[in-house]
Amino acid sequence: MKETRLRVLVLSDLFPNPARPAFGIFVERQTFHLQRYSDNTVVAPVRIFPHAKLWKQFWNPQRFALEWKQWRIDLACIPRQDTLNGIPVHYQRYTSPPRQLFHGVWGIFAYLFLARKLRTLHRERPFHLIHAHYASPSGVIGPALDARACGTERSRE
């Protein structure tokens, strides 16, 4: 009987990227060390709504322009897809309202933006396990993906 390696989808907006190379390094380290036992694919949602720090500078036009420019530079340097220490990473963009008011529903917004990519990844190499980090957005996307995006009977290998 052929042994199938466990295929894991890691969903985490806490994952290093070129703009923030140490951000969520603990998730990258976990994923890296699990490669010995599983084939991992990471989907790291990237929220593209400007953060509150930027909007606090709104009444200072010069500072606001500098913050806006830096935010755009940081966003532009994050590729759509990359490989980090042998781990395929998909940096999928999504947007949602400000966290201070709507953090609890970020996952719903993220799922709407990521569903197509997640279905495509699942069709290419069906996942056995979804490892979602943090309650929102990943903790919302994971169950929605399991129930809807994969949308088929669970494969038995």
Image (cartoon, grey):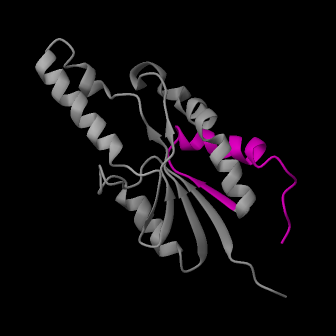
Residue 115: quarter of image: top right
Task: Give the answer, above or below, for where 141 lies relative to 133.
Answer: above
| Residue 90 belongs to magenta span | no
Residue that extends furthest to the bottom in the rendered view of this protein: 1
Left or right of 157, for residue 117? left
Q: Residue at x 34, y 28 (%)?
A: 50
| Residue 131 belongs to magenta span | yes
Residue that extends furthest to the top in the rendered view of this protein: 59
Q: Residue at x 48, y 30 (%)?
A: 95
Residue 127 can be seen, yes or no: no
Which one is in front, 18 or 143? 18
| Image location (x, y in percent) of residue 155 | 84, 62
Quadrant where the image shows the C terminus: bottom right
Quadrant where the image shows the N terminus: bottom right
Residue 6: quarter of image: bottom right
Left or right of 19, for residue 40? right
| Image location (x, y in percent) of residue 76 | 34, 43
Q: Residue at x 70, y 40 (%)?
A: 144
| Image location (x, y in percent) of residue 107 | 56, 34
Task: Give the answer, above or below, for where 84 lies relative to 80.
Answer: below
Task: Give the answer, above or below, for where 123 lies relative to 94.
Answer: below
Left or right of 31, for residue 2? right
Task: Give the answer, above or below, for where 37 lies relative to 106.
Answer: below
Q: Residue at x 52, y 73 (%)?
A: 34
